[in-house]
Amino acid sequence: MLSKNEWDTLKTVIVGVADGARIPKLDVSLRVVNYADKTDEKEIPEGLYPKQVIDEANEDLEVFCNFLRGEGVEVLRPKRTPHPNYYNYCPRDSVIVYNDMILATPQPLRARYKEYLAMHEHFEPLERLGARYIEAPIKYNEELYNLNCLGDKDTLALNETQPCFDAANVLKVNDDLIYLVSNSGNKRGAEYLQSLVGNKRVWTLEGVYSYMHIDSTITLLREGLMLLNPSRIKSVDQLPKPLQSWDVVWAPDPGDIAHYPDYCNSSKWVAMNIFSVNPNLVAIPNHQHELRKELEKHKIECAMLPARQQRTLGGGFHCVTLDLFRGK
């Protein structure tokens, strides 16, 4: 049994690397999924991230890894060979590990095609133990992308011509999966995921956040307790039924989180992209003192760790991890 939720005691995890991280050459997929809000394509950077960004990100990832090892967690890493078109920084984006399934999802960015192969050596032993390893098909054709989304945040980037989604559009809640419909995940993707999980249920979340992933909107802290983004969720009635009875911690405003000049790959709410090591311990950015105070009211200990380039590279502690085993 692989990981089935976001909070049981962590046993084995993959933590990303920043080596060779780059913004790919502009194409239709990158334009509509990541930069639909840009009116001038000249504002979109291209090429390798600055050396300072990569070095600081790797330093902070190493601190994170050492913290996890100190908690008794087995830490694995992707291959450090730089991804030719994007990065291996956010393992969460490309693979869902759930119950007996390892699913490499049909990601919307052409540049991220087969990004999961950097982690494949860690999946092979699990296959031998009986895990289902699935590489979802994807065809990067023009019909998949909706150019009408440019400059219109109410229009999503993906058409419904085929299943397409990042793994980070999904949260695991034991027998339920919560799937955000957004620029990085269409409704066909939720239907495809449902076809793979048998009697488990995939619940869609729509109309709350169009940009990308779910984990800067909802963070599941432990069973029955969640952290919500008040700028996107106004009432638990907006949430899928399995979460409507949960207690809520409303995330405080994270303030102005710095990023490298001209490179910003996420909003300030990446600060609530935190990671549960067990039901009573989370890793959070070391500048989020108000968030720590709110979590401690609920008897959750906070490990305050450096995350200097999380907004630049677009990934907090939840994004840069892929939990393989939790629980006993």
Image: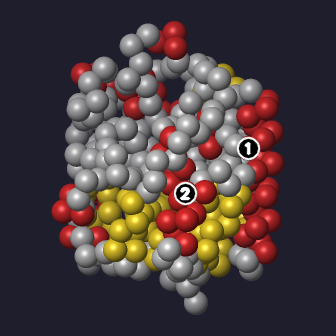
Of circles 1 and 2, the one toward us is 2
Front residue of this view, candidates 70 and 81: 70
Front residue of this view, candidates 259 and 61: 259
Residue 290, which numbered label? Answer: 2
Residue 127 in sight in this render: no
Real-space Cα distance between discs 1 and 2?
Answer: 23 Å
323 on left or right of 145 = right
Q: Position of residue 111 (x, y in %)?
A: 53, 33
Q: Where is residue 178 in the image (x, y as percent from the top left)?
A: 32, 63
Residue 258, which numbered label? Answer: none
Q: Which residue is drawn at 81% across and 48% down?
A: 59
Q: Which residue is drawn at 28% across and 30% down?
A: 153
Q: Give whichever of discs 1 and 2 has the lower sequence position.
A: 1
Residue 57, which numbered label? Answer: 1
Disc 2, SS: helix
Q: Residue at x 48, y 76 (%)?
A: 298
The quadrant in which the C terminus is found is bottom right
Q: Residue at x 75, y 37 (%)?
A: 54
* Label 1: few (<14), some (14–19) or many (≥20) C-alpha neighbours in 10 Å: many
Q: Where is residue 74 in the image (x, y as percent from the top left)?
A: 73, 74
Disc 1, SS: helix
Q: Where is residue 247 in the image (x, y as percent from the top left)?
A: 34, 74
* Label 2: few (<14), some (14–19) or many (≥20) C-alpha neighbours in 10 Å: some
98 on left or right of 66 = left
Residue 216 in sight in this render: yes
